Image (cartoon, rainbow, N blue to C red):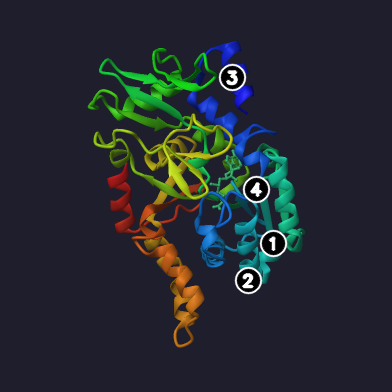
């Protein structure tokens, strides 16, 4: 990876950070996510809600079923999981759907868009018991000719999409490029002007009230990521779970060094130039930008809540069914997923309706929360 990046910089000059990140994570042979599959979990580099246990998948399945019933039990229907990684969440969701509602399960087209061959092979193996319901595609654009009602969703995938890094220097924003010193070490180059019109447009709403040297991240790829997913749904929802903030919190002047983190062996660090291809690179999600992009593509925000509140509501029937016969292991999973000091407060959920034929009403509380966010 190091040699490949050095050669690119020698040939083309400093690399934009989004380009650098796309190569280090997703280069088809050498990228962090392409080389191995054990990043998530105790033996890997970081935990996600999926690593907590199968309850997370079961609760997502319950939310999907609630949508399916409200949509008039369409048959067939479709779930598209982006960022399915090793297939664990898909297996948990499919197992729960199969036992909760065999009719919905039998009518389901579960699609995993997965560009990386090694991950796709791992998913196929893990999802063998559900093979009749699951399809793997290298590119979700292939679904546009047969759209179905359904939901496109992902857990911790938006934070893994490449982002630009920018620095405020008094006269305006400067993109951070990655150069290479005479000793071969990678270094920052913030001298190049801002020439990318998409990046300039994404920076415009942030304003100008930032201290010199303020660094932050901006993603311009949400539209390209959502468009094929939306084309695959005749009606339904986008549903994203991730860490992040609404724009006013994200770009607060006090957050001077942004949210970029690298993860390796459960250690967080902040220098993505040290070991490209060896550590994960991530930054929080600007949910306002996500919503604005989806709205521009015809979606309508339904809800933006923290994961704790959202899962607690989704789990209502599950919690009632457990009354009198509590399962300590499952309740521990529920607490980890929902407690404000654990995953419940740090993660947020954004639901957006797409092509809804009979627009779903949203509650006054959700309306208020959405209005606060954008
Ligand atoms: C942080 S991991 C999360 C994995 C899993 N969803 C979980 O919650 O445990 C991010 C995953 O998103 C995948 N990913 C990133 N960009 C993607 C894209 N454009 N299409 C499909 N998967 C993508 C990565 O390959 C990786 O498997």
| Residue density around tag 1, few if under 14, some if 14–19, many if 20 or more, within 10 Å | some
Q: Secondary structure at mark 4?
A: loop
Q: Secondary structure at mark 3?
A: helix
Q: Residue at x 50, y 54 (%)?
A: 48
Q: Position of residue 91 (x, y in %)?
A: 65, 61
Q: Kindly identify which numbered label has been placed on residue 107.
A: 1
Q: How many marks?
A: 4
Q: Residue at x 45, y 32 (%)?
A: 219
**Which residue is outermost to the front?**
183
Do labels 1 and 3 touch, CB within 8 Å? Answer: no
How many angstroms separate mark 4 from mark 2 (CA)?
A: 31 Å
Q: What residue is pinned by disc 2?
A: 101
How many angstroms separate mark 1 from mark 3 (CA)?
A: 50 Å
Q: Is residue 152 visible?
A: no
Q: Is residue 179 visible?
A: yes
Q: What residue is pinned by disc 4?
A: 37
Tell me where residue 57 sits by quadrant: bottom right
Marks 4, 2: nearer the viewer: 4
Earlier residue among tags 1 and 3:
3
* Whether residue 179 is situated above or below residue 35 in the rendered picture: above
Marks 1, 4: nearer the viewer: 4
Q: Residue at x 59, y 22 (%)?
A: 5
Q: For disc 4, does the CB lie below 8 Å from ligand 1?
A: no
Q: What residue is pinned by disc 3?
A: 6
């Amino acid at each position: 990876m190091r040699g490949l990046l050095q050669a690119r910089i020698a040939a083309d000059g400093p690399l934009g950070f989004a380009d650098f990140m796309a190569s280090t994570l997703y280069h088809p042979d050498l990228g962090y996510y392409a080389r191995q599959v054990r990043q998530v979990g105790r033996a890997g580099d970081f935990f996600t809600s999926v690593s907590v246990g199968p309850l997370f998948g079961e609760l997502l399945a319950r939310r999907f079923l609630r949508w399916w019933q409200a949509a008039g039990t369409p048959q067939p229907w479709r779930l598209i999981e982006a960022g399915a990684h090793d297939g664990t969440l898909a297996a948990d969701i499919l197992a729960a759907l199969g036992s909760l509602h065999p009719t919905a399960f039998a009518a389901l087209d579960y699609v995993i868009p997965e560009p990386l061959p090694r991950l796709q092979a791992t998913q196929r193996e893990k999802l063998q018991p559900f093979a009749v319901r699951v399809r793997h595609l290298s590119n979700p654009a292939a679904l546009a000719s047969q759209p179905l009602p359904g939901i496109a969703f992902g857990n911790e995938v938006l934070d893994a999409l490449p982002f630009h890094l920018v620095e405020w220097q008094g006269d305006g924003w400067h993109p951070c490029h990655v150069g290479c010193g005479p000793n071969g070490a990678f270094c920052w180059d913030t001298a190049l002007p801002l020439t990318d019109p998409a990046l300039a447009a994404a920076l415009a709403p942030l304003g100008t009230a930032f201290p010199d040297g303020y660094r932050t991240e901006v993603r311009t790829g949400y539209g390209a990521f959502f468009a094929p997913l939306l084309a695959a749904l005749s009606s339904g929802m986008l549903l994203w779970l991730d860490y992040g903030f609404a724009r006013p919190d994200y770009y607060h002047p006090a957050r001077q060094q942004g949210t970029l983190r690298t993860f390796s062996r459960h250690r967080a660090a902040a220098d993505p130039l040290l070991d490209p291809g060896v550590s994960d690179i991530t930054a929080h999600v600007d949910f306002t930008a996500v919503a604005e992009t989806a709205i521009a593509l015809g979606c309508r925000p339904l809800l933006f809540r923290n994961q704790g509140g959202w899962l607690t509501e989704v789990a209502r029937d599950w919690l009632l069914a457990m009354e009198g016969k509590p399962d300590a292991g499952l309740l521990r999973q529920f607490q980890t997923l929902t407690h404000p000091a654990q995953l419940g407060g740090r993660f947020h959920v954004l639901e957006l309706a797409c092509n809804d034929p009979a627009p779903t009403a949203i509650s006054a509380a959700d309306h208020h929360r959405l209005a606060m966010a954008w």
